[in-house]
Image (tube, grey):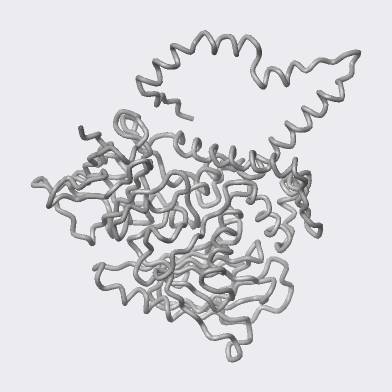
């Protein structure tokens, strides 16, 4: 992991002045040294020290459980929020028909495409058929945000997650049959058959547009989606396509002790996957056990609250220190550079998994492709060119050199680092994209300005909010060669005096 110093000169001076006190604190023993040096008296540890160790163990387990469970907690936050604001059922597919603005709270939304979100329950409804329309691009994930894979090969390949243009139907449309993890019934012919590893299924459609004033085409494609229980098409509930753009909804996951109550709801409803037994054991030590009520006492509630808040801050630390895209700049990979299940040959990269789901949702193979003209890349920065955190009361300039390496389109977005939601800055959207026809410089590059006040007419400006920090994300859809060989590089955000 890359080590960097982000201490401003003033803070460095304060730390220097406080050095004697720090030395005294170190001499008296750190928290960890105190635990390691708890004395054995006649080969025994006192009752008081034993309780200290048990409390510490419980806290550590709660922190690690939160980080490991983030994919499911993140998903349940969206699911329960969507059901509250838009309605519940396999027939409800919420479409953000006028794009997703900052009034909808959700982790790192893309305001420059059309989103559709659906939340299915295979336990309640059994196997479900999804009729994906022609011209679609989408993702099917389970409730640990893992791509759902085909039951066997389709045209010589096992497909996972991707639907539509980069999926097995190649954008021509198809009927996908999604089976529960424990389904043992007959499987009829005529479907692309997939099996989920959880009862919950996340349907995530994305639509692209060429003109921000003409959004009807991708919306109409999504509205051709049909979802219904297997063998019950004629008696299925009619599809509903509520407009998410009309509602200021909160789809964020909890970052306090409520996260454990939410995870308990996930555990109670979900399929028991033997692969999860060890972490379910950690959850059981905190009172989260399938088939039993979760009833933490006041002491436990306080500890869980502190653990969740600590773990969420660790997610921030992991993301901001996850290694740089460029050795001489502050950009970090918004999407970890492993694969859709964050795995290497012999292990799962749990740090990247936790950092990603702190600020984002959904995965699929296409998102992780390192191939010219395919997938997308998301360079992200929390710091300016001097390594200082980005502040809402300051002004910055980002230069995107000419010939931006994005075959489809590019965009720049400002986000709230506390929760990953779009920065609610008073503008229609906290972003600029290629379709907005931003003003180019004479050399073909683009200057994007961030700050609380406009840099003047004819400037590309994303407003920031005094008193609120932000982070910036550059999206490159279908990145081309110069991104991968790094002959094209965005500048850092340069402070403007």
Left or right of 491 in this view: 65: right
Q: Does residue 410 sit above or below 17 in this rendering?
A: below
Task: Please state which of residues 413 and 155 is positioned toward the viewer in this rendering.
Answer: 413
Snapshot quadrant of residue 391: top left
Q: Residue furthest left?
A: 442
Q: Residue furthest right?
A: 42
User: How many marks overall?
Assistant: 0
Residue 478 in view (yes/no): no
Which x, y percent locates residue 149?
57, 63
Left or right of 109 in this view: 149: right
Task: Please state which of residues 288 and 249 is positioned toward the viewer in this rendering.
Answer: 249
Snapshot quadrant of residue 16: top left
**The C terminus - image quarter:** top left
Q: Does residue 476 sit above or below 469 in this rendering?
A: below
Left or right of 425 in this view: 276: right
Residue 21 in view (yes/no): yes
Q: Does residue 126 sit above or below 106 in this rendering?
A: below
């Amino acid at each position: 992991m890359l080590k960097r110093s982000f201490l401003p000169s003033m803070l460095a001076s304060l730390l220097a002045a406080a050095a004697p006190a720090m030395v005294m604190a170190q001499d008296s023993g750190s928290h960890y040294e105190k635990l390691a040096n708890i004395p054995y008296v006649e080969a025994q540890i006192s009752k008081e020290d034993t309780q200290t160790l048990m409390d510490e163990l419980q806290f550590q387990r709660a922190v690690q459980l939160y980080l490991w469970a983030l994919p499911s907690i993140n998903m349940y936050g969206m699911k329960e929020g969507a059901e509250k604001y838009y309605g519940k059922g396999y027939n409800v597919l919420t479409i953000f028909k006028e794009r997703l603005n900052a009034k909808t709270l959700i982790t790192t939304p893309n305001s420059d495409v059309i989103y559709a979100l659906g939340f299915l329950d295979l336990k309640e409804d059994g196997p479900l058929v999804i009729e994906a329309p022609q011209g679609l691009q989408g993702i099917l994930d389970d409730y640990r945000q893992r791509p759902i894979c085909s039951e066997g090969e389709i045209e010589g390949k096992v497909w996972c997650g991707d639907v539509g243009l980069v999926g097995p139907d190649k954008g021509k449309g198809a009927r996908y049959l999604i089976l529960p993890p424990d389904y043992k019934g007959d499987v009829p012919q005529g479907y692309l058959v997939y099996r989920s590893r959880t009862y919950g299924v996340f349907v995530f459609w994305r639509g692209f547009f060429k003109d921000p004033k003409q959004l009807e085409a991708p919306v109409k494609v999504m509205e051709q989606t049909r979802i219904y229980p297997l063998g019950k098409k004629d008696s299925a509930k009619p599809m509903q396509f509520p407009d998410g753009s009309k509602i200021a909804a909160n789809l964020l996951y909890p970052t306090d002790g409520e996260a454990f109550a939410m995870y308990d709801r996930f555990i109670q409803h979900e399929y028991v996957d033997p692969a999860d037994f060890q972490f379910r054991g950690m959850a059981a030590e905190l009172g989260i056990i399938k088939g039993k009520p979760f009833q933490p006492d006041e002491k436990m509630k306080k500890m869980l609250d502190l653990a969740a808040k600590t773990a969420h801050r660790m997610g921030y630390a992991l993301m901001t220190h996850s290694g740089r895209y460029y050795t001489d700049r502050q950009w970090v990979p918004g999407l970890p550079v492993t694969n859709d299940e964050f795995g290497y040959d012999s292990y799962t990269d749990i740090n990247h998994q936790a950092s990603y789901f702190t600020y984002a949702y959904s995965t699929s193979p296409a998102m992780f492709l390192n191939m010219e003209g395919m997938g997308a890349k998301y360079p992200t920065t929390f710091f300016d060119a001097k390594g200082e955190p980005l502040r809402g009361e300051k002004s910055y300039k980002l230069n995107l050199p000419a010939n931006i390496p994005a075959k489809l389109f590019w965009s720049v977005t400002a986000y709230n680092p506390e929760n990953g939601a779009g920065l609610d800055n008073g503008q229609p959207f906290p972003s600029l994209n290629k379709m907005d026809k931003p003003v180019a410089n004479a050399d073909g590059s683009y200057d994007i300005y961030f700050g609380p006040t406009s840099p003047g007419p004819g400037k590309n400006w994303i407003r920031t909010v005094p008193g609120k920090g932000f982070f910036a994300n550059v999206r490159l859809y279908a990145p081309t060669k110069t991104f991968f060989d790094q002959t094209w590089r965005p500048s850092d955000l340069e402070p403007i005096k």
